[in-house]
Image (cartoon, coloured by chain):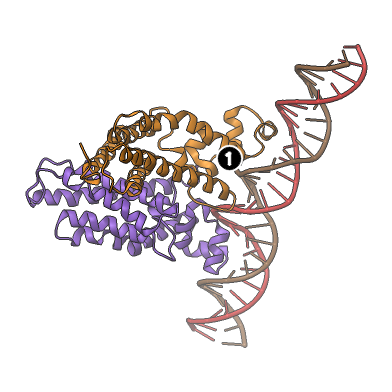
Chain colours: A purple, B orange, C brown, D red
Amino acid sequence: MRLFWAKGFDGASMADLTAVMGINPPSLYAAFGSKEALFREATDLYSETEGVGIWRSLHQSATARQAVEGFLRESAAAFSRAGDPPGCLIVLGALNANGNNAAICEDLRQRREANVAELRTRLEAAVREGELRAGIDCEAIAVFYVTVQQGMSIQARDGASHARLLAAADGAMAAWDSLTAGSPR
Amino acid sequence: MRLFWAKGFDGASMADLTAVMGINPPSLYAAFGSKEALFREATDLYSETEGVGIWRSLHQSATARQAVEGFLRESAAAFSRAGDPPGCLIVLGALNANGNNAAICEDLRQRREANVAELRTRLEAAVREGELRAGIDCEAIAVFYVTVQQGMSIQARDGASHARLLAAADGAMAAWDSLTAGSPR
DNA sequence: CTCTTTGTGTAACAATCGATACACATATTG
DNA sequence: CAATATGTGTATCGATTGTTACACAAAGAG
């Protein structure tokens, strides 16, 4: 998982993978079936480990604003954690389709799309509960905040510090009042 | 340029490049020297063609707000232009270093960093001219808006429509008043 | 112990990677 | 015209890609 995280699906060669796993190719294929299947298990593991921390606040925060702010701040922390590869595996794992990784690209794309849906669902719940005004565009707001989080992966890969990622997160949160204008306090 | 734009540095093979150029490998190497040098010329061409439209408003707009808004809206248009590869070559060209593309990754990273500096310079000019309050954090604001633009490349690569990219741009602009609060009208 | 099953190491598979050697054709120069 | 420089096509280079055939070793079952 960490190797795919650092080098991407294409960048991590079988030689790299077998080296860090301390096994030989036949053992890897007997255990996982293929490089593609191994990557899928790696992304699942990533979601179960790194992902839960990033998305935890979305459902545990009392207000929608705290939920979104926690989502961005957890992302900033996870994307710049010392010892971990910078950025997000789901975002950086495979962006350029090339015939060998088409299925992987599509799988990651769906996971990213699911992130937008999850955020939008949280906002819609806040609207139903009367926390946010009924007329706001939950889809557009979700797209905006996910876009910022995805940009933070690029920034992290470029070496951005935790503070710099927080600057992006804070900038995004500065839009909250305007985006949800008219909502009850 | 368009092939690198669509498939990235690693994804565009010499066979692909020679095919679309209608020449054979020896001619390509005689003309450009190497795949890496060809990519550099392609990125230069990209900056001179696609780049100028994206950055034009930054120096031609009367106010800093119009400059930043134009930058984001031009990006949204360029990243979803029909017939062109989605997203930005500078952002998507090479994100995962793998030994063969280390110099390319660093070159693109510097170009992305230069974008932050260019935006910050425009904001600082607005501060000097008295348009924006002196105490605002131009670096943090520049990082935020560039982060959004980079996230828009991911969104575009995922198939986002022009309208969806504009939603991200509008969300980012919703933060403007808060980020520049206290500035003279 | 003998037999069977499971798993590993070695080696190599065909395919593709970026990059060239070499001979031939073309074009320019004197 | 002849002579020379320039550029292209064919074919292939060694290296690396993901994947697998095969023989051997270890371990459990009777």
Viewport quadrant of the N terminus of chain A? bottom left
Does residue A130 appear left or right of residue A44 in this picture? Answer: left
Q: Chain of mark 1?
A: B
Neighbour tally class for label 1: few under 14, some 14-19, many 20 plus, Cα within 10 Å: some
Q: Position of residue B52 (x, y in %)?
A: 43, 30
Q: Is B174 above or below relative to A80?
A: above
Element class at badge 1: loop
Does residue A73 appear left or right of residue A41 in this picture? Answer: left
Q: Position of residue B89 (x, y in %)?
A: 46, 38
C19 or C24: nearer the eye?
A: C19
The residue located at (28%, 48%) in the rendering is: B136
A84 or B48: nearer the eye?
A: B48
User: Hey, what amino acid is under mark 1?
Assistant: Ser
Does residue A92 appear left or right of residue D23 in this picture? Answer: left
Q: Position of residue A180 (x, y in %)?
A: 15, 45
| Residue underneath mark 1 | B13
Q: Position of residue A41 (x, y in %)?
A: 41, 60
Does residue B160 appear left or right of residue B93 in this picture? Answer: left
The residue located at (48%, 53%) in the rendering is: A9
Residue A26, visible in the rendered structure: no
Residue B28: quarter of image: top right
The residue located at (9%, 46%) in the rendering is: A183
